[in-house]
Amino acid sequence: MEQFVHWAIPVIAVIALSAVAILYNWLQKQDAGTRRMKEVAHYIQIGANAFLHRELVTIAPFVVALAVLLLLAMPEGKWQVALGFVVGATFSMLATYIGMNAAVRASVRTTSAARSSAARALIVAFRGGGTMGLSITGLTIVGLFGLLTLFGVNADTPERIHLLVGFGFGASFAALFAQLGGGIFTKGADIAADLVGKVEQGIPEDDPRNAAVIADQVGDNVGDVAGRGADLFESGADNIIGTMILGSAFISTYGWAAVLFPLISEAIGAIGAILGILAVRGDEKRNPIVAMNIGFLVSGLFAVVSYYFLATAIMHDIRLFYCLTMGLVAAILVSLMVQYYTGIDQKPVKSIAEGGLRGVATNLIYGFSWGMESAVPMIILVAIVNVAAFYVMGGGLHGVLGIAAATLGLSVMKGIIMAADAFGPIADNASGIAEMSGLGADVRRSGDVLDAAGNITKAITKGYSMSTALMTSVVILFAYLLSAAKLAGIAHEHMAAFATLRGTELTMDVAQMVRYLSLAHPLNIAALMIGATVPFLFSSQAMKAVGRTAFRLVDEVRRQFREIPGLLQGKAIPEYSRCVDIGTSHALKEMVAPTLIGVIFPLTVGFVMGPWALAFYLIGVKVIGATLAIFMFNAGGAWDNAKKYVEDGHFGGKGSEAHKAGVIGDTFGDPLKDTAGPSLHILIKLQNILAITLLPLFYHYHIPWE
Amino acid sequence: MEQFVHWAIPVIAVIALSAVAILYNWLQKQDAGTRRMKEVAHYIQIGANAFLHRELVTIAPFVVALAVLLLLAMPEGKWQVALGFVVGATFSMLATYIGMNAAVRASVRTTSAARSSAARALIVAFRGGGTMGLSITGLTIVGLFGLLTLFGVNADTPERIHLLVGFGFGASFAALFAQLGGGIFTKGADIAADLVGKVEQGIPEDDPRNAAVIADQVGDNVGDVAGRGADLFESGADNIIGTMILGSAFISTYGWAAVLFPLISEAIGAIGAILGILAVRGDEKRNPIVAMNIGFLVSGLFAVVSYYFLATAIMHDIRLFYCLTMGLVAAILVSLMVQYYTGIDQKPVKSIAEGGLRGVATNLIYGFSWGMESAVPMIILVAIVNVAAFYVMGGGLHGVLGIAAATLGLSVMKGIIMAADAFGPIADNASGIAEMSGLGADVRRSGDVLDAAGNITKAITKGYSMSTALMTSVVILFAYLLSAAKLAGIAHEHMAAFATLRGTELTMDVAQMVRYLSLAHPLNIAALMIGATVPFLFSSQAMKAVGRTAFRLVDEVRRQFREIPGLLQGKAIPEYSRCVDIGTSHALKEMVAPTLIGVIFPLTVGFVMGPWALAFYLIGVKVIGATLAIFMFNAGGAWDNAKKYVEDGHFGGKGSEAHKAGVIGDTFGDPLKDTAGPSLHILIKLQNILAITLLPLFYHYHIPWE
């Protein structure tokens, strides 16, 4: 069985990557429409690749410098950690590059397909998204399995698993750039296009006379597609690495499978995603969300069946099946919660829209309140899953493995959810291309149906990826603590005393380590306080960055309307590329300050307050970051849909006071839901993996307070 | 010396309460102005007392029921805890009743004084606020010293100090009602008055034709004066009780003074406040804030000198002097930070105002960002003070006493800061009375100067009381843990092993208890997560309550304009009292859901997850609650001043786009800064004291997980 697993993992990775190539080719073969459509798509493609190129140029020196630093500073495993870091960053960028290019190509082909069949358009858009979904799972498996083999980690050298952390660090680092840079760009362009176009000039959304309109479309690709892809790539990597480190404590129980277990789960996710993507079939009459739900169902059922096999035939522990399935169920519950708090026909959105009847401020107050409330059930769900998985496995370190299994179960749907998520911006872009190419109203209408479905999938993905991030960070926390215990020289068999409240024999060295982790010390409490502030600081900087980028673009679009003769009359073409350029260079510049926050704070806490206080700092960052991010996503999503609800003819419809209030709420919510919120994921995960990578340094060189 | 201290404390309490009586009489003797002014003031007074009366009627059955429950359920000290609870609640209401009535009388006399002398007006307003400041300090000392004597707690029975917690619980409970009910009322009335008056009818603020205008004035008194008074009364009580419980571990070192120490600090604060209030002298030319700063300076200097005496002559430990002074310094730094983030001539406010040039959304994005950022330095300051005070005292339990001392130093300025805070709504009301009584422009102008100064003092008080609450909650956390250790039967001399990272002999029973408090347990992490969500849930409910109350009042004001003939022409008088009635009944009804949140969550966590996980839950509530609250205060304050900045003629001045954006930002910020934010203090403190009161129940009856 071990032999089978050992070979199955790389084979499945190859299958996943072949599926990427097949899907990509299939997409290329679809009709790309009229000359005008191809032209618009060409602009978007050039802009998106220009952004990625500039991002690459910006990130490359940082990657090299950090790799050199790791090479010099790490007390052990120098080249492995440094190499892993470079591979992680490279694979992340590669996956997002492939996925984003597929998405860009899919958009125009979706528009084209929509001219003849809405069902066909759905398939094109979903498969476009699927390319991203499969390339991230495939490359994660290839990268981690490859490094495992290269570093010669096996059942006799389980402690070498720690060498893999470099890969996660690299993936986190690349993701921060992709998500934060992309997020600043996309919202800066979106707000600028709206402020000058819709508000000042009174021209429709996506009107080709608006110079920022291509930048806005590019933003959908670099922010929503590439950014979220890098985010999920990282989540997967961190999650697998953390579980592997934990698993290495269970080789005596489960054999080498204890370590390979998360990679098997990832492989199950890859096959499930392929099946799910193939199962999504459009239908002229049904809501597209129904077709996608069938895809989810297929993926989910495949995972449940495979998990039963994994738990019974490979791990020989049925309790792991319960934990894995629990994670899957949690994923469904999260999606239902998000649908309630942001769904257009639910109470929260309606009451926000109604608030607009009494003025803008009441619309804002309601959106803010519902957003805050929405974080509560989701975080409590994660808390309950943690405790339940822990006790299903009987508590102790086994219990922690149960939490890791539940996290794997939550994240197994990654491939198909990523496909559904990328579907959103593809459909959005398709609508934009239809508008800019002057296609008929019926094409645009079927585009709008896909677009509305895309709004839901985007919201679900955010909630999903945040709960994954929060669960993952608990796993990583324990991996961190076990690694620290190893550094402290605590014998392997004594570590079982962690994560138990009583019973197990408490040796003096474990008692001492537990004391380091006690809440009853002001250093730890202070670290927790500092950790709690970081998501606030980070979000504030990210939002100000969006504001400044939007200002620059507003000025540029105004300038073009002023200086290019005949532009408003449609007799001239705006300089789209200038807006893309300005947006790109600003977004990448604005990214530096928040990135530094994400790096300098944990470094300072780690060296000044020590590795134990750092654990409290991290839990502060995670818990507050997650709560804040969910609030931001859902408030933003609800404001967006409250506007749409009014536009559908409620409370006075378009042009009414309630609509004006709705537009303001939506614009205010944009940077919350698409910049600050998603970037908080990355902040959380980057700090996690940075802490675990640099732990040996913190351990040896921190200030000894007592 | 012990004898001297023992007598000095009650004597100073009597002095403080006599000063209250003297100030109150002095106020009554001041001229209350014209018949019209008296009439307006009469309306306000009736409304404010009607609110307090209804609040009393609402709260009384709860107090009785809870007292009976405590009497039945507490395993020991039944009648003492129940009696303390009733006394705490009663004293809190008494202090706020006296203080609010003084404030209501001071307002009209301030208006009257402003007719002849701005300097005189300042003195009247400040002394009006001072009455509240002194009544809370005086009654705190009387209550706690009285119960201490009644329960026969002395150096031979230090464990009986725990009986005092009932007083804190009662104070917390009353404060929740006062702050939350008052906060919902005041912002509901304020928003309604603005929406119908300024926006719909285009009549000025405080115009007597607006039916909600008296309710708005009443709101200033019941929300800002009574609410904040109850808040600070509670902070003081909790802080003193927590420090006394901690101090009881130090009787062998410092004698009985270890326990009386916080009461002495409170007494120093009382005398300092009297001196400070007398030192505030108006001057026609100077900014009123300068006069108040002199008052602060006098209070602060008196405290420093007295602290030196306290540390050297009574406690015989100079390190305590450093800690106490550190707290005082922190209070100054907090005030400077608040002034930066909300000050009208500082960068944040200017950039928010400028954001309005590009639309409402950019004003909102900037306000939100700066508000988030503002929480960072304040929380980090608190973290640093904690660690610094801890290590100045050499760490360990002594270190924790250092933190308690720093907290006392921070809160010693309570009396004078409360005076300055109540000054705000008094000045605000005075302006309103001037407007409603049709006084000349010069009277209104000098009122406006006082009003602007009041905005600053209100913002400072919020930041100050939040940092006090956060520091206090660390003290209470340790008091909680020590009480739990006592219940666990850990010997007194072994407790020194808490709050030390290494060194002290670690006995097995302490090691076991430390293990309960380890971060390396999913139950604790889950509790922390749940705790983090509660401030979000609570704020969202409080804000929705404001929204609903405002809606009802909007409908009522609209109805009066529609149905009362000649109202808009000024030929008829609106039915002010109906608005007050509606606001009162709604606010008190709306208060129930958030109150239940504050009670049910800790009860559930305590019984289901146990007393140790509850400590993690509490730290989650505290840290997130404090960060969120500071963000809310400062964002709200900055939006308010950004609007004022535009009104001062910048970016287009009144009526411009930037101004419209400013008005919306201000209205949105109102419930953040005046309802949700301040109520979060109380939530934090209520949960703290509830946990410590019910600890014996949680300890004996929680679900045993392992």
Image: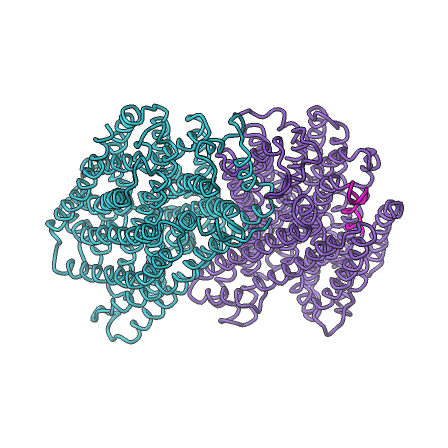
Chain colours: A purple, B cyan
Residue B620 location in percent, x, y? 50, 46
Q: Is residue B360 left or right of residue B188?
A: right
Q: Is residue A265 magenta?
A: yes
Left or right: A520, with B428 as reference point:
right
Q: Position of residue A177 (x, y in %)?
A: 66, 41
Predominant SS of the magenta segment: helix
- Residue A74 vertical placement versus A295 (above, below): above
Residue A198 position by quadrant: bottom right
- Residue at 54 percent across and 72 percent down: it is A649
Viewer-nearest residue: A79 or B142: B142
Say whether residue B383 is visible: yes
Residue A384 appears in which quarter of the rendering?
bottom right
Q: Left or right: B690 with respect to A311?
A: left
Residue range in magenta is: A251-267
Q: Can residue A562 be seen at all in this image of the molecule?
A: no
Can you give x and y, in whole percent of width and height, for residue B631 in the image?
A: 45, 46
